[in-house]
Image: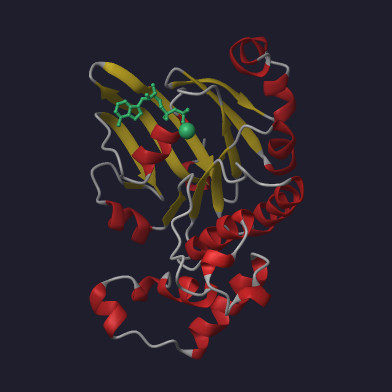
Amino acid sequence: MNTETNVLVLENLTVGFDGFKAIDALNLNVRKNELRVIIGPNGAGKTTLLDLICGKTKATGGSIKFNDKEMLGAAEHEIVRAGIGRKFQTPSIYENLSVFKNLEVSYPSGRSVFGALAFQCTPEIKHRIDAIADEIGLADFLAVDAVQLSHGQKQWLEIGMLLMQEPDLLMLDEPIAGMSVRERELTAALLNRICKGRSMIVIEHDMEFVKKIADKVTVMHQGKILAEGSMDQVQADERVIEVYLGH
Ligand code: ADP
Ligand code: MG
């Protein structure tokens, strides 16, 4: 495969906890402009995989190439700066700040203490905040404190905070957990909009949701890749039915 079309290339990626391999010699390629969904049973290693890519957990072996650059061993902030954004399962927003402020502090130069002191909300930044608030459906909530948002709106705000950094690769871990049916529909539409011009990795269990967003689906099991392909291909795969979909 032409590596130029891959934003992310994982080779032999491995991490062990007390001799147990949570990720076991895993190989995975994600292409530019692709929305990849990762599914698999609890404990398969999905969250750990994202932890390795964003530098939260250090791999014990293998390689993580992002835009052809080795990221293994890089610090978390370097990985963010290189263009990888990651959303955790519980939103990490500033509840006592307004939606506008939450987005503003997420602007890259506003992040360090020095940057925050020198920070000026220029018309260009304001424009980006407005555009992202519109994208995440919170244009009418800019002045509202985040604490007052619904569960779904908080999740969208955190996605918006990641978008402020204009990542090339955006990773979301179970973004629709706890959402209402309507919020799930809106989130599927949101992800289909924001995947334009970037790559995404989304971990999700809800197969109706996966169907709406996935370009390609990777099925993980016991720290390895069990199957990979279109939604139809993995749904018809006997091994996938056996370990995951049949339950
Ligand atoms: P998933 O997200 O697919 O449900 P996880 O990646 O959370 O799975 O977990 C994979 C396995 O790795 C589980 O058995 C879990 O207990 C183990 N694990 C994850 N993180 C750690 C850690 N920091 N220390 C020890 N074991 C861990
Ligand atoms: Mg998980």
| Residue in the picture at 34% in, 38% down | 52
The quarter holding residue 151 reads bottom right
> Where is residue 101 drawn, in percent x and y?
47, 76
| Residue in the picture at 58% in, 13% down | 243
| Residue in the picture at 57% in, 66% down | 148
Q: Is residue 241 left or right of residue 164?
A: right
Is 60 rendered above or below residue 96? above
> Where is residue 2 drawn, in percent x and y?
51, 40
> Where is residue 31 drawn, in percent x and y?
54, 44
Question: How many dots with numbers?
Answer: 0
Q: Residue furthest front?
A: 148
Q: Nearer the viewer, residue 198 or 193?
A: 193
Is 168 rendered above or below residue 225? below
> Where is residue 86 drawn, in percent x and y?
44, 50
Is 14 rendered above or below residue 110? above
Quarter occupied by the C terminus: top right
Ligand 1 resides in the quarter of the picture at top left
| Residue in the picture at 64% in, 35% down | 216
Q: How is the image coloured?
A: secondary structure
Q: Nearer the viewer, residue 91 or 148?
A: 148
Q: Nearer the viewer, residue 219 or 116?
A: 116
